[in-house]
Image: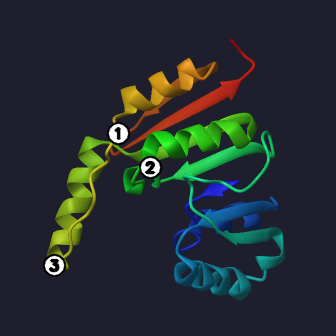
Amino acid sequence: LEIGTGRGYMALTLAHKGFKLTTIDSDSKIQRSARDILKHYRVEKLVRFKCMDAECINFKDDSFDYVLAVNFIHHAKNPIRCLSEMARVAKEKILIVDVNKRGAYILEKVHAKDGHKHERSKISFPRIREFLWKAGMKVRTYRSSCQTTIVASKGEI
């Protein structure tokens, strides 16, 4: 399960590798655009699109082996609720990749040049790790210059 379809680049990357996935986003218009991109590359049959809010994921517990959120969590209005839902529907692992402080600073500069403002996250990486750890998951963190990746695994503690 991918949280936050956006323009569909992650879904496209995974579909190109042969993965079947479900992707959710609350914005049906951007999902239509993502679907068009996947159709162009002839991989749309590998991806199931659902218009859905990440704060209330309409799937049963343990529905997906893996739950993936790339550059989503800093957009979440209620990130703890989203994390709770992600943990509920994940059978094995959650992968969260998002911009860190340096990455957010760069995005703010880029968006400002277009006259836009880029959102800063409402939750810190330590708070994400703490939440997932308290949910009974083993949590690993990987850092690069502009992004942080958190991998949380169920049943490995």
> Who's the residue at 46% across and 22% down the image?
130
Residue with the mark numbered 1: 123
Specify which label sits upstream in the sequence, 1 or 3. Answer: 3
The one nearer the camera, 144 or 38, is 38
Front residue (pair 38, 120): 120
Q: Position of residue 89 (x, y in %)?
A: 72, 43
Report the side of 148 relative to 6 (left or right). left
List the residue tagged with mark 3: 115
| x and y, in percent, of residue 99 in the image | 36, 48
Which one is earlier in the sequence, the residue at label 1 or at label 2?
2
Q: Earlier in the sequence, mark 2 or mark 3?
A: 2
At a point 46% along the width and 39% down the height, the residue shown is 80
Give the x, y percent position of residue 21. Answer: 77, 60
CB contact under 8 Å: marks 1 and 2: yes
| Residue topped by disc 2 | 73
In three-dimensional space, the C-alpha distance between marks 1 and 3, rounded to whole angstroms, equals: 25 Å
Name the residue nearer the viewer: 17 or 53.
53
